[in-house]
Image (cartoon, rainbow, N blue to C red):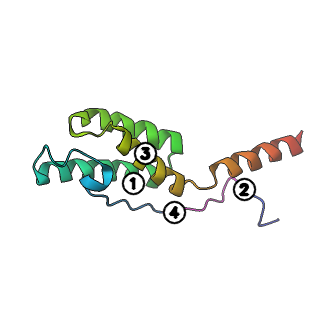
Amino acid sequence: MNITTIHPNFRVSTQLNVDLSAAQWGLYTDRFSRPVIEKVANYLNQRIMREFNRGETQDNVRFSFNALAKDFAIYGATDTQVKETLNLILDKAYPNLDAMKEYQLSKKIDKV
């Protein structure tokens, strides 16, 4: 068996740790008490880590995060800066997504 060929029973696993503050997320730190807004940041951090570490796809992580962010919209969780931060995290967490899709497509074509 060629070890470089991806096999369904072979999976490389990576654990993601996210510990961003409310300010790093871009939440409304000037409108709410520090303990409250940092708790919101912690919820956002935990959601990304939970979904990623469960092996969810990038799209599923984004969907789950956005669903939670809607609950915290009053704190700025649906604003552009939060979305940009999420995109940066996901781009780092899933660096070879396009390359992997291309590889999988080429393997399907090779089998035809």
Q: Which residue is mark 4?
A: 14
Q: Are marks 3 and 1 in contact (CB under 8 Å)?
A: no
Amino acid type at image mark 4: Thr
Query: How much space separates mark 3 and mark 4, taking CA atoms?
Result: 22 Å
Q: Are marks 3 and 4 in contact (CB under 8 Å)?
A: no
Crowding at dot 2, Cα within 10 Å, few <14 / some 14-19 / many 20+, comes out as: few
Q: Whole-Å distance between the Cαs marked 2 and 1?
A: 26 Å
Camera-nearest residue between 86 and 67: 86
Mark 2 against mark 1, which lies toward the viewer? 1
**Of the image marks 1 and 4, the number of the one nearer the N terminus:** 4
Q: Are marks 2 and 1 in contact (CB under 8 Å)?
A: no
Task: Look at the image and tell me in which quarter the C terminus lies.
Answer: top right
Give the class, few, some or many, for how many residues have Cα within 10 Å of label 3's Cα (few <14, many ≥20): few
- Write the residue at 44% across / 36% down: 63
Q: Which residue is mark 1?
A: 49
Q: Residue furthest left?
A: 33
* First to last magenta residue range: 8-14
Residue 3 at x, y percent in the picture? 77, 67
Instruction: Check the image and name the residue furthest to the front.
Output: 30
Is there a contact, CB below 8 Å, between mark 2 and mark 3? Answer: no
